[in-house]
Image (spheres, rainbow, N blue to C red):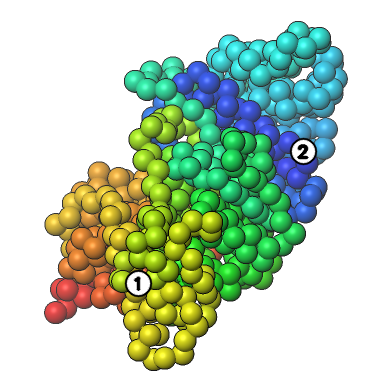
């Protein structure tokens, strides 16, 4: 029996390769399997090489998998450029209507479009292929039949015919695979039982729901890959009384609009990606200077400039920390999984209210767009925070003191000037040196209100530790567990609270011989920041637009550890 398998659907954009992986993952999750998807595709609307991958397991999944058990190649290019990812003993399903492969022991040619027409449902080619995949993986077709019935039973005339056609297509695909005599050599174990309800959800959905749980009231955004899905999800979902969702004409309009929302007393948020975030820099500087609460979700993609609009990267940390000119340091929360995206977004909204300023929710394409089964988030655990609102007792001295002072909401007591120029305690513009010093210290001192973030720590006695951030958490954790099982003396730290770091975490990191940071960028951005804070941190970097592979990451970690051991031995 098998506990895990990975299938990749590869072809051209528009051929349904991403949809095929999502359907298989959804069907598996419905009966209790753990699933995780990953997709990569070009930036054009249709065409270009694309693939979607699903990992299905009886145990929790940390990464999308290093190798593929079943490769579905819909054209020759897809086969040629993905075959090296097939593990030994894996099976290829290829589109025999498009190309032919030389005789081989691990190939199954399927004329999917022809079989779909024979099934009576010409649009069921994906189901033909999925049926073949299920047979080869030893996954009972009844799981997929149940999914088809649930998905297409919408109470409309003709539903029965659609269901019948798709189930017939599943069986036709399975029969075609059976005729090949191939399989993965074992059947998939039965799905596990769960103590709590689990849901299949995408990262951007989890983030939006977390923000709503914390009480976000105003969301204004401009479409940009890969952040558009947050905007469209909010348009469909954030519809309670006294809420507003709008589509702006640019990222500059988005940031200025939510500054207005925050100034008016509303919990306000937007979503964008790297190029749009750059355009928001001046607005974020205004929000920092005027102390206006708001949240910007930056869904990272490859850059700079247009870069890689549909690929994943972790290269916006530096600009997230300081998106504008001058002395500023923004709070940054970077979730490492779909489940964390819910809590990170809720905390970002709360942080903005607590310290009265802009907060960056720094996620990335690989998290936002993946589907993963997670324990249903308990929204009742989110305690929405509200800014301290002025009752008039401090009159109009809005910016008095070193902490968050009462916030005057327009129409209420405490009139003041929300000023982007340097200002005194009531917001009047001034260029006096002592006032600039006092106000700068105030703005930075408020960050101490956010030093409440939690962190993970294991094997803290180790002199060399691993500390990933963001979406690299899953592959790094799998590599860490693999190395720990082999007796490697390696510690583990992790937090999604990157700025400000939990103070106790920073103190622990300063005592380590080496802190290894896996991150998807060229510069080693987090390790550079940590070195500036007295931590001997160095990065393992990758900038392919794809996540780390666990095996390669584990090998690189060991190389770094051997280098440290050699230096210690020479001393």
Image position of 512 with respect to 261: above or below: below
Residue 419 lies left or right of residue 145; in this view the side is left
Q: Residue at the location (78% across, 41% down)? A: 14
Crowd tier of the residue under label 2, counting other residues whose Cα lies within 10 Å: few below 14, some 14–19, many 20 or above: some
Mark number for residue 15?
2
Residue 449 lies left or right of residue 292; in this view the side is left
Between tags 1 and 2, which lies in front? 1
Residue 29 at x, y percent in the picture = 51, 25
Residue 246 visible in this rendered orientation of the protein:
yes
The secondary element bearing badge 1 is classed as loop
Q: Residue at the location (38% across, 85% down)? A: 435
Q: Residue at the location (43% across, 57% down)? A: 352
Q: Nearer the viewer, residue 210 or 192?
A: 210
The secondary element bearing badge 2 is classed as loop
Residue 511 at x, y percent in the picture = 17, 68
Q: Quadrant of residue 258?
A: bottom right
Which badge, 1 or 2, is on the more N-terminal residue? 2
Mark number for residue 400?
1
Mark number for residue 435?
none
Q: Quadrant of the C terminus?
A: bottom left
Q: Residue at the location (26% across, 72% down)? A: 535
Image position of 472 with respect to 111: above or below: below
CB contact under 8 Å: marks 1 and 2: no
Q: Quadrant of the N terminus?
A: top left
Q: Nearer the viewer, residue 356 or 126?
A: 356
Q: Nearer the viewer, residue 320 or 359?
A: 359
């Amino acid at each position: 029996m098998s506990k895990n398998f990975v299938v990749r659907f590869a072809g051209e954009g528009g051929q349904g390769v991403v949809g095929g992986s999502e359907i298989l993952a959804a069907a598996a999750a419905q009966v209790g399997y753990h699933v995780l998807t990953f997709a990569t595709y070009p930036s054009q609307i249709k065409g270009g090489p694309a693939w979607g991958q699903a990992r299905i397991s009886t145990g929790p999944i940390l990464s999308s998998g290093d190798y593929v058990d079943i490769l579905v190649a819909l054209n020759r290019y897809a086969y040629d450029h993905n075959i090296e990812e097939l593990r030994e003993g894996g099976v290829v399903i290829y589109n025999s209507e498009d190309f032919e492969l030389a005789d081989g022991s691990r190939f199954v040619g399927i004329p999917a479009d022809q079989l779909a027409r024979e099934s009576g449902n010409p649009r069921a080619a994906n189901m033909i292929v999925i049926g073949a995949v299920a047979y080869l993986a030893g996954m009972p077709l009844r799981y997929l039949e149940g999914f088809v019935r649930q998905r297409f039973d919408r109470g409309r005339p003709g539903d029965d015919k659609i269901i019948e056609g798709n189930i017939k297509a599943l069986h036709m695909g399975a029969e075609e695979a059976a005729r090949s005599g191939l399989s993965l050599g074992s059947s998939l174990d039965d799905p596990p039982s769960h103590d709590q309800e689990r849901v299949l959800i995408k990262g951007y959905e989890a983030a939006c729901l977390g923000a709503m749980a914390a009480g976000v009231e105003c969301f204004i955004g401009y479409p940009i890959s890969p952040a558009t899905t947050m905007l469209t999800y909010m348009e469909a979902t954030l519809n309670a009384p006294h809420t507003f969702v709008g589509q702006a004409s640019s990222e500059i309009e988005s940031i200025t609009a939510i500054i207005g929302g925050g100034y008016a007393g509303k919990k306000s948020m937007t979503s964008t990606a790297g190029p749009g975030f750059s355009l928001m820099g001046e607005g974020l500087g205004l929000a920092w200077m005027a102390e206006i609460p708001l949240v910007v979700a930056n869904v990272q993609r490859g850059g700079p400039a247009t870069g890689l609009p549909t690929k994943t990267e972790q290269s916006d940390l530096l600009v997230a920390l300081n998106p504008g000119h001058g002395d500023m340091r923004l709070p940054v929360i970077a979730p490492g999984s779909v489940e964390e995206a819910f809590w990170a977004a809720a905390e970002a909204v709360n942080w903005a209210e607590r310290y009265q300023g802009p907060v960056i929710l720094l996620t990335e394409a690989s998290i936002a767009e993946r589907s993963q089964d997670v324990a249903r988030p308990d929204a009742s655990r989110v305690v929405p925070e509200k800014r301290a609102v002025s009752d008039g007792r401090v009159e109009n001295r809005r910016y008095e003191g070193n902490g968050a002072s009462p916030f005057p909401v327009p129409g209420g007591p405490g009139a003041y000037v929300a000023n982007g120029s340097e200002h005194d305690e009531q917001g009047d513009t001034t260029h006096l040196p002592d006032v600039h010093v006092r106000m700068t210290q105030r703005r930075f001192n408020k960050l101490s209100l956010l030093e409440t973030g939690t962190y993970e720590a294991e094997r803290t006695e180790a002199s060399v530790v691993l500390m990933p951030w963001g979406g690299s958490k899953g592959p790094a954790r799998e590599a860490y567990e693999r190395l720990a099982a082999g007796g490697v003396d390696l510690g583990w730290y992790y937090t999604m609270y990157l700025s400000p770091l939990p103070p106790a975490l920073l103190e622990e990191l300063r005592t380590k011989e080496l802190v290894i940071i896996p991150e998807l960028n060229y510069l080693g951005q987090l390790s550079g920041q940590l070195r500036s804070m007295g931590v001997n941190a160095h990065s393992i970097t990758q900038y392919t637009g794809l996540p780390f592979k666990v095996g390669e990451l584990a090998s690189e970690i060991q190389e770094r550890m051997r280098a440290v051991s050699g230096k210690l031995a020479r001393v």
